[in-house]
Image (tube, helix red, strand yellow):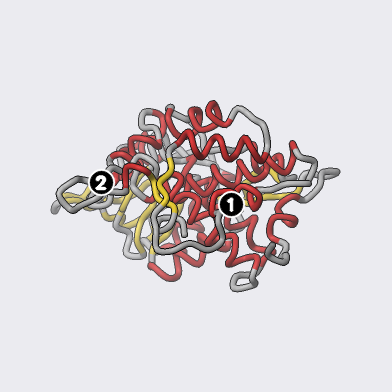
Amino acid sequence: MNGKYRRPFDLWQPNFQMPEHTELLWVYEGMNQYLGDLLSFRMGIREPSKYPEYLAAMYARLDAESGRETTPLIDLTTGAPYYYEARGPWSNLRRTAGDFYAEGELIWLDADTIIRERSHGRKSLDDFLHLYSEPALTGPITKPYTRTDIESLLNDVQPYDWHAFFERYVYSVSPHPPSGDLARAGWRLVWSEDSNAFIEAGEAMRHYDDESFGVGLFLDDTGKILSVRQGSAAWNAGLGPNMTILAVGNQAFSPKVLHYVLREATHASGTIPFVVQQDGWVNTYELNYHGGLRYPHLERIPGTPDMLAQIMAPHRAR
C-alpha cells in the first residue's frame, strides 16, 4: 500500500524518461520500517518484551553518529541513490541511506506517542493510517502524496504543529534522534556493562564487536577496526579504520581479552596500550579510557503509563 497505492508525488513518474526524486522517503521507508518492526513484535514473531531493547539499540546507534551534527535527514533522502551505493570507512561521519529507515522509524513512533498522549488514548497512528489508505478498495491506481498532504491528514487526526515537528527532525540538522517518544511512552535510556540483546545478536551473526558507545571502537573478531566514533578515546588516541589490533593491555587480541581489559581499566588510572598494525607498520597507541563496557537499554520511568505496551498490544483491525 505505502509505495504502490500511496506514493510520494516525486516518486511517481509517467514514463521512464523522467527521473524519480526521493525527498519523501522519510515517509515511504520510515513509516514502512516503523510498522514492519512494530508488527513483528505485536504479532509475536519477535518477543514483545524485547521491543524496548530493540529501540534502545536503534536510538543509541543513531545518536552516536557524529555526521548528524552537519547532515539533516532530508539530505539523505534526496541523495538516496548515491547513499545506497556509498562504500568505505567513516560511514558514521557521512551518515548512510539506512538512517532514513531507522530514524524514520523513531520519527513515526514519536508521532504515534504524540497522538496518543494528546488525544488521551482515544486515537493513535492507526487513525492516520486509515485516512491515509482510504478508500479500502480501488482499482490498480497510484495516489501520490506531498508533505502538505501528510501533515494535513495528521492534523485531521490530532491537531498539532506537525510542520514544525518534521521541520525539526527531517529538514533541519538534529543533534539527536527523536527522544520525546521514549519519555512520553514511559521509558528512558540507560547504560550498563550488560550487553544489549540486539547488539549481541548482531555481533554473533556478523562476527564483529561493537564497542562504539564506550571506548569508541567498532571492529571485527580478528581485531580489524571498521569504524571509530568521533570524540571517543579511540579517536583521540589516533586509531582509525583498516588498522588491526594485535594486542591490548599487553595481551594478544581477542574480543574476550578486549572486554576484560576494558573492565579492568575502570579500576586503574593509567592508559591502555593498543599494539596496532597498518600497512606493514606496527605502533603502540595509548588510550585514556576508564568507562568500561557500555551498552544501551530502556528502563521504565516509575509512576508513568507504559505506552509501548499499549502500542505493541494486538488488537482487532477496524
Res. 240 in view: no
The spot of residue 201 in percent (x, y) is: 50, 67
Image-based side of 274 in relation to 260, left or right: left
Q: Judge whether 10 appears above or below 220 on screen.
A: above
**Disc nearer the start of the sequence (1/2):** 2
Q: What numbered label is drawn on residue 129?
A: 1
How many callouts does the rendering have?
2
The spot of residue 146 in percent (x, y) is: 43, 38
The spot of residue 109 in percent (x, y) is: 60, 47
Q: Which type of secondary structure does the marked residue at label 1 adopt?
A: helix
Residue neighbourhood size for the residue with mark 1, other residues' Cα within 10 Å, grouped as few (<14), some (14–19), many (≥20): some
Q: What numbered label is drawn on residue 20?
A: 2
Res. 202 in view: yes
Q: Judge whether 203 appears above or below 98 on screen.
A: below
Q: Judge whether 134 appears above or below 23 on screen.
A: below
- Comparing 101 with 28, the one in front is 28
Image-based side of 92 in relation to 194, left or right: left
Q: Which type of secondary structure does the marked residue at label 2 adopt?
A: loop
Residue type at mark 2 is Glu
Q: Judge whether 283 appears above or below 135 on screen.
A: above
